């Protein structure tokens, strides 16, 4: 007990930055001690699919040839399609090179940890930008990493996509608030780097993220424009042009990277209807359709955002599938509901995240409300067949609503 008191006293006497770093490292080690010391590895899609492709790519390069064809999938398919194309770009290539000298299974686990750290750092900086509070920012970042990202490490594509979201929002705010905008080359470089990073992610989530960031940036720009004086409008125009350059660079880079593989897949496998499913064959040259899976009501969507396992009694919509949050929503819903209704420091982004939360829940329950037909007939929006994946965005909204006030 005395040792515990001394440890707590020593921790409290440290400066703020040291305490925050210590708290973050402690949380990280507690959650990932086994993979960090090589005692376990992440299962599910990550090693059943992602790691197999990673190893094939690594071995191919080491043997001196560039893998553009994979003979082991569907009797042969264009290798750099969907998230595989991310293996050809700097982030994953770094770990591919490391896998030549260190056990590739362990290196792949380190890559997962790096993605989560990238997400945590980005969230911390985003909250610091919007709240100016180190403790709230650290707690929000750790919550994002532990409550949100840890349970879905098995789906590596989701990790790449979702870890990029706070960085894109942070960059958007920074660009719009930059008083000396005009050097757009740096924003092009930022956009290209993010575009290559998200090429390892889940296509539907990447598109949704870009839509969210675009609307988010537009809201900030409109607010700044309405509150600016005439002599400030010229600088604001420059900032708005810079944000257009930044977002366009991301979208163009991502399109150039993923479209060749996707078009090749459609050309060779016109019956394919995986994660690009759409009920309207004319939209993507598909001759077959498949069922969309969604929560059966708004009530079920809210329950799913709390803990999907509560709702697994109905096998018709495969409610046992979205177990990724593992009850993470309990924490954020309770914290959110515990907030006073009249918040002392009203934040301009609360309205944005509140609306997005409602839309996320409506989307998740698309079959049972008026949005159902709109979703099924809207390209990109209808490209995700697992509508209950939107539980992720519900949790993100709760996270930002909780800590941005």
Image: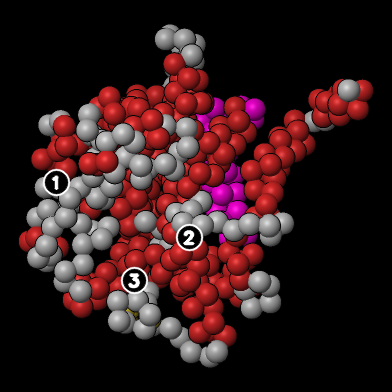
Q: Is mark 1 on a helix, strand or loop?
A: helix
Where in the figure is residue 217, as x and y percent of width and height?
36, 40
Disc with the residue nearer the chain's start (2 vs 1): 2
Residue farthest to the bottom? 64
Name the residue: 38% across, 30% down: 310
Where in the figure is residue 133, as x and y percent of width and height?
61, 27
In this orientation, does residue 228 appear?
no
Marks 2/1 in contact by CB < 8 Å: the verdict is no
Marks 3/1 in contact by CB < 8 Å: the verdict is no
Disc with the residue nearer the chain's start (3 vs 1): 3
Q: Is the residue marked by circle 1 packed among few (<14), some (14-19), or many (20+) residues within 10 Å? A: many
Q: Residue 81 carries which label?
A: 3
Marks 2/3 in contact by CB < 8 Å: the verdict is no
Residue 368 magenta-highlighted: no
Q: Which one is in front in this view, the residue at disc 2 or the one at disc 1? A: 2
Residue 114 magenta-highlighted: yes
Name the residue: 31% across, 34% down: 313
**Left of 164 or right of it: where is 364?**
left
Name the residue: 92% across, 23% down: 2
Q: Is mark 2 on a helix, strand or loop?
A: helix
Between the residue at mark 2 and the residue at mark 1, the CA separation in whole angstroms equals 29 Å
Q: In which quarter of the image is residue 72?
A: bottom left
In this orientation, does residue 267 appear?
yes
Q: Mark 1 points at which residue?
A: 376
Q: Name the residue under label 2.
A: 46
Of the pair 96 and 302, the residue shown nearer to us: 302
Give, as a single range, the part of the protein colored magenta: 110-135
């Amino acid at each position: 007990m005395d040792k515990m008191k001394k440890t707590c006293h020593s921790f409290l006497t440290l400066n703020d930055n040291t305490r925050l770093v210590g708290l973050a490292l402690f949380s990280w080690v507690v959650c990932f001690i086994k993979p960090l010391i090589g005692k376990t590895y992440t299962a599910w899609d990550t090693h059943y699919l992602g790691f197999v492709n990673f190893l094939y790519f690594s071995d191919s390069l080491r043997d001196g040839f560039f893998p553009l064809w994979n003979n082991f999938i569907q009797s042969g398919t264009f290798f750099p399609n969907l998230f595989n194309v991310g293996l050809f770009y700097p982030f994953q290539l770094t770990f591919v090179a490391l896998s030549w000298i260190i056990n590739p299974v362990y290196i792949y686990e380190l890559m997962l940890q790096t993605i989560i750290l990238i997400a945590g750092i980005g969230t911390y900086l985003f909250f610091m930008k919007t709240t100016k509070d180190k403790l709230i920012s650290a707690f929000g970042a750790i919550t994002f990493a532990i409550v949100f990202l840890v349970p879905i490490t098995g789906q590596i594509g989701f990790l790449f996509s979702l870890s990029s979201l706070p960085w894109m929002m942070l960059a958007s705010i920074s660009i719009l608030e930059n008083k000396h905008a005009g050097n757009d080359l740096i924003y092009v470089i930022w956009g290209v780097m993010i575009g290559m990073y998200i090429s390892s992610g889940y296509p539907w989530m990447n598109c949704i993220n870009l839509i969210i960031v675009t609307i988010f940036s537009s809201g900030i720009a409109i607010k700044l424009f309405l509150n600016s004086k005439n002599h400030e409008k010229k600088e604001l125009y420059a900032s708005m042009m810079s944000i257009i350059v930044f977002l366009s660079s991301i979208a163009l880079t991502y399109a150039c990277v993923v479209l060749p593989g996707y078009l090749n897949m459609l050309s060779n496998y016109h019956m394919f209807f995986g994660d690009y499913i759409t009920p309207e064959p004319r939209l993507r040259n598909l001759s077959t359709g498949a069922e969309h899976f969604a929560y059966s009501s708004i009530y079920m969507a809210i329950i799913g955002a709390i803990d999907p396992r509560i709702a697994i009694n109905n096998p018709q919509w495969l409610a046992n599938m979205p177990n990724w949050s593992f009850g993470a929503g309990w924490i954020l819903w309770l914290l959110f509901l515990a907030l006073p209704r009249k918040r002392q420091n009203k934040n301009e982004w609360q309205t944005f995240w509140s609306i997005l939360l409602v839309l996320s829940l409506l989307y998740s329950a698309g079959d049972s409300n008026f949005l159902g037909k709109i979703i099924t007939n809207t390209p990109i929006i209808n490209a995700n067949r697992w509508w209950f994946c939107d539980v992720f965005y519900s949790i993100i909204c709760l996270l930002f609503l909780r800590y941005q006030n």
